[in-house]
Amino acid sequence: RRAMPSFYAERERLCPLAILSLPGRVSYINFLFPLFLLLSIAGLIRGWRSRERKRPVLVAVGVLGLFLTSYYPVTWLVAQPLESGYEMNPIPQESAQALVVLSGGAYTPVPDRPYTSPQRQTYDRSRHTAWLYKNWKALPVLACGGGPYAEPLAIAMHEVLVAEGVPPDKIWLETRSMSTYENAVYGCEILRRHGISQIVLVDEARFLPRAVACFRKQGMKVIPAAFNFNHLYWEADDFLPGSRAIQMNGELLHEYLGLVWYR
């Protein structure tokens, strides 16, 4: 079984039905999308074999596009150029002076939850950084994240880091950035004030190429700490078309376009 962060494991224990919504698990609704797609393919084949001269070319392209963008093995292949350059060993192989973690997203305050809450990527990155702090080296941690929220994302990251065992006096906050580029610009200003020139940069493997390039552009020596690689497992969720692949493909497209734009 795939390991889950403690937060999600506790959520499963307290509410068994909540597991149906977790990524990487098969839920009842996961079968509806491939079922409807299969019906569309059947209708397409029937239309293509009809005696009418007009072939449903646009429909064929649309159905094929839906299949490719929702089929996880295709997603896994698309992710390889971004991820293949990094080792899966969670322990950095070089020394550094600080750990740097970048924010992902957050849930903005709403009436029934009047505070900013970190989304899954922000939580996972912060927790992985805390794991490195406890299991590798107790280095200072720089949490980078501003964002268009009531409070900077770095503050929510600070709460996760502290809850996971990083002492508050070991955490520095960068709260002005609105993008990966600004993470590097404003983050390196803080690092240089503390005499830091070599860092471990924590991020999901697919996001690291652009993030590493940004920090190196600012003159920082960067040791990548890649995690959350894309893997293929012999599970229905990996081989049935579904929303997980669609979301992941959106992130991958963002990264490829970002690499071109930043260059």
Image (cartoon, grey):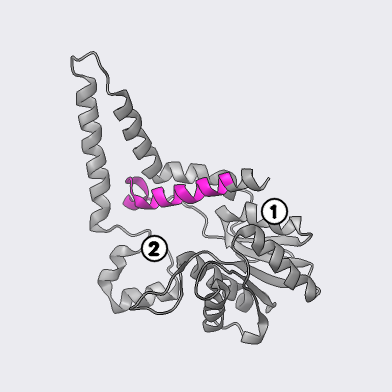
Image coordinates for residue 245, horizontal then vertical, percent: 40, 49
Mark 1: amino acid: Ala
Position of residue 169 in the picture relative to residue 227 (left or right): right
What residue lies at 53% left-to-right and 73% top-to-bottom? 127
Which residue is labeled 2 in the image?
1
Q: Nearer the viewer, residue 234 or 221?
A: 221
Q: Which residue is mark 1?
A: 213
Kind of residue indicated by mark 2: Arg
- Asked whether residue 250 is drawn in magenta, I would say yes
Tell me the mark number nearer the camera, choosing from 2 and 1. 1
| Location of residue 169 with respect to 221 vertically, above or below | below
Classify 122 as above or below 61.
Answer: below
Residue 219 picture quarter: bottom right
Q: Quadrant of the N terminus?
A: bottom left
Count of picture labels = 2
Q: Secondary structure at mark 1?
A: helix
Q: Tell me which label, 2 or 1, sits earlier in the chain.
A: 2
